[in-house]
Image (spheres, helix red, strand yellow):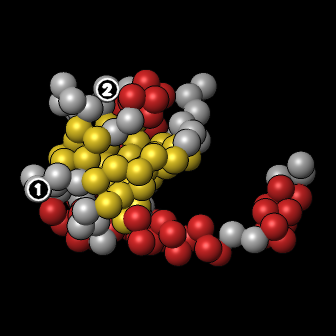
Amino acid sequence: MMSATGTYEHSLDAKGRLFIPAQLRRELGDTLYVTMGIDGCLAVYPQETWDTFTAKFAALPMTESVAMRPLFANAAKCEPDSQGRIVIPAMLRKFAGLEKDAVITGVHNRAEIWSAERWQEKQEEITPEKMNAILKGLGL
C-alpha cells in the first residue's frame, strides 16, 4: 500500500511548472492527476487512486454525480518531465492562490500542493490539544 509523506518547499517557474520531489514521485508514480482539493489546496492523485475515484463516479446516479463534476472537470493529467516538474494549469493555480512559493505535502494516498502562505496559516492552527484530539479519535 502506497503512503505519501513529507513536506517540501519549491517555487513555480514562469511557465507554471512545479518540481515534484523525487521521494513523492517514487511514492505516487509516473502519472498524476491534479485537481481542486479541500481547504484551498490542490490535490495530487496517483493513477491508482484516480482510478478508484473514476469507478465510484461511474457507479453514482447522474443526479448524485453532479457534486463531483468540479473534481473531474478541473483535473489535469500530469507526467513529470525529465527534471521532475509538472505544469499546473492557470485555473488551478488561481484556485489555490499559487503565484510563486509552494508547499507540497504527502497525505497518505495523495499529495497536496499549497501556496506557502495558506500552508503557513494551516500550520499556525495546529495546537497540542488539537493533535491530542485527532490521535484520540483514531484510538491512538
Q: Which mark is residue 24?
A: none
What amino acid type is highlighted by mark number 1? Ala
Identified at 31% across, 26% down, the residue is: 30
Instruction: Name the foreground residue: 50 vs 18.
Output: 18
Q: Are marks 1 and 2 in contact (CB under 8 Å)?
A: no
Identified at 54% across, 37% down, the residue is: 4
* Residue at image mark 1: 14
Q: Is residue 124 above or below residue 77?
A: below
Identified at 58% across, 33% down, the residue is: 3
- Which quadrant of the rendered structure holds the N terminus? top right
Identified at 22% across, 41% down, the residue is: 86
Determine the residue located farthest toward the left in the rendered image: 15
For mark 2, give the secondary structure.
Answer: loop
Instruction: Name the foreground residue: 50 vs 35.
Output: 35
Q: Taking 20 as reference, is 48 left or right?
A: right
Q: Taking 33 as reference, is 51 left or right?
A: right
Q: Taking 107 as reference, is 100 left or right?
A: left
> Residue 128, position in %: x, y?
81, 67
Question: Label 1 crowding class (10 Å Cα cut-off): few <14, some 14-19, many 20+?
Answer: few
Instruction: Name the foreground residue: 107 vs 8.
Output: 8
For mark 1, give the secondary structure.
Answer: loop
> Residue 116, position in %: x, y?
40, 65
Specify whether residue 109 is in view: yes
What amino acid type is highlighted by mark number 2? Asp
Residue 133: image quadrant is bottom right
Of the image marks 1 and 2, the number of the one nearer the N terminus: 1
> Residue 14, position in %: x, y?
11, 56
* Residue at image mark 2: 30
Distance between mark 1 and mark 2 Cα atoms: 23 Å
> Residue 52, position in %: x, y?
45, 38
Q: Depth-wise, is mark 1 or mark 2 nearer the camera? A: 1
